[in-house]
Amino acid sequence: MPRAEYREEPCKSALNRVKGMGFKWSLNPYMGCVHQCTFCYVRAFEHRAQRPSDERYGTSIRVKVNIAEVLRRELGRRSWQGELVAIGAATDPYQPAEGRYRLTRACLGALAEAGNPFSIVTRGPLIVRDTDVLQQGAAVADVSVNFSVPTLDRTIWRYTEPNTAPPIQRLRALRRLVDAGIRAGVGVAPILPGLSDRPELLAEVVKAARDHGATHVWANVVYLRPGTREHFMSSLARHWPELVPMYERLYGDRPYLPDAQVRPLRKQVQELAKRYEVADRRQIRLAVPGSGELLGQQAGAVEPAGPSQLALVLSTDASSRPHQAGRRTRSRAA
């Protein structure tokens, strides 16, 4: 890939209000992602904003150099209700730039200091560097980490997630976090019809997740909005041309597969999670359970209003819902 350009720019706000997802607030220390996954749904946002969504996406990264300071101010406002903050919804917070800039780490520190719940989605093993800050956060609020592992097949991974760490490295990072007491699971997402949806490949991911200590597993199928669709189909035509007619037939003019076709795949992964007994087996617990958990009640999280690649929890622990954890009791000055 061409050498990425990093633009160091201050931001005016850190927290972004989100609609139509299972969370209300997101945080993105960077904009743009050098991973350049062919199926990335953020390409659709770039397309809508009339920015490059093709192979140029990910070659220019905005670095929000002051985001941690802005975040602290926003968390300290009297109007802030301490709601869950989703990190990684629009760009991977542990892409290589984080090794230099450490902005994600600084933001996690701010959230931990405020006792504010947060959830992370990443493909970056670099997250283990921040185990200490994650522990600090998990001791005072609901914290979860979700590693995206769509497949363990090396050919599919290489052509669809070209600049990411190998999936096995993500699973090893997951193991280290779980051993440190962090709730961490696997998102089998996005599932790619005709490629990663084969039963043996799905079983391979879920079993590996269980073997590495995943506390939960969730899944969803790729969706192809304008911007994402063109780039993904172009890549598909290069590497798997025989699948192009199938995708054109399956998706037609829709960005999503019909629920009748998605539901069986979700159910399949759910059954695999039960077969391999995916569950929260952490030996270290960093926070006192809330009253609802003590009573054996599930967290009252709300499902996203529409289809999402970050949507479905398949373990029995509802509090592990990606980007939907509840907030622990926190006192605030009146």
Image (cartoon, helix red, strand yellow):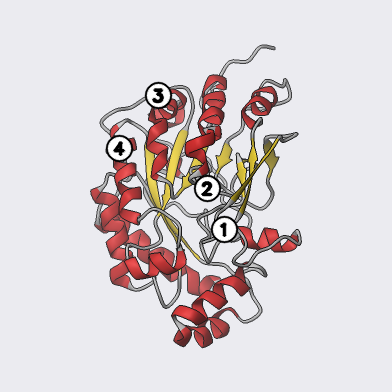
Which one is closest to the eye, mark 3 or mark 2?
Answer: 2
Q: CA distance from mark 1 to mark 4?
A: 28 Å
Q: Which residue is mark 1?
A: 308
- Which numbered disc, 1 or 4, marks the residue that appears first in the sequence? 4
Which one is closest to the eye, mark 1 or mark 4?
Answer: 4
Q: Which amino acid lies under the numbered mark 1 shown in the image of this protein?
A: Ser
Where does the image place residue 17, in percent across and percent down from the top left?
A: 70, 42
Numbered circle sitting on residue 287: 3
In the shown orientation, is residue 153 left or right of residue 102?
A: left
Q: Which residue is mark 4?
A: 176
Label 3, residues with CA under 10 Å away: few <14, some 14-19, many ≥20: some
Q: CA distance from mark 3 to mark 2?
A: 27 Å
Q: CA distance from mark 3 to mark 4?
A: 18 Å
Q: Residue at x 72, y 22 (%)?
A: 77
Label 4, residues with CA under 10 Å away: few <14, some 14-19, many ≥20: some
Q: Residue at x 52, y 75 (%)?
A: 235
Q: Which amino acid lies under the numbered mark 4 shown in the image of this protein?
A: Arg
In the shown orientation, is residue 114 left or right of residue 209?
A: right
Q: Which amino acid lies under the numbered mark 2 shown in the image of this protein?
A: Asp
Q: Which residue is mark 2?
A: 92
Label 1, residues with CA under 10 Å away: few <14, some 14-19, many ≥20: many
Q: CA distance from mark 2 to mark 4?
A: 19 Å
Which one is closest to the eye, mark 3 or mark 4?
Answer: 4
Count numbered badges in the picture: 4
Where does the image place residue 185, in percent across and percent down from the top left?
A: 38, 46
Find out whether the residues at labels 2 and 4 contact each other: C-beta distance under 8 Å.
no
Which one is closest to the eye, mark 1 or mark 2?
Answer: 2
Label 2, residues with CA under 10 Å away: few <14, some 14-19, many ≥20: many
Towards the viewer: 121 or 158: 158
Whether residue 193 is visible: yes
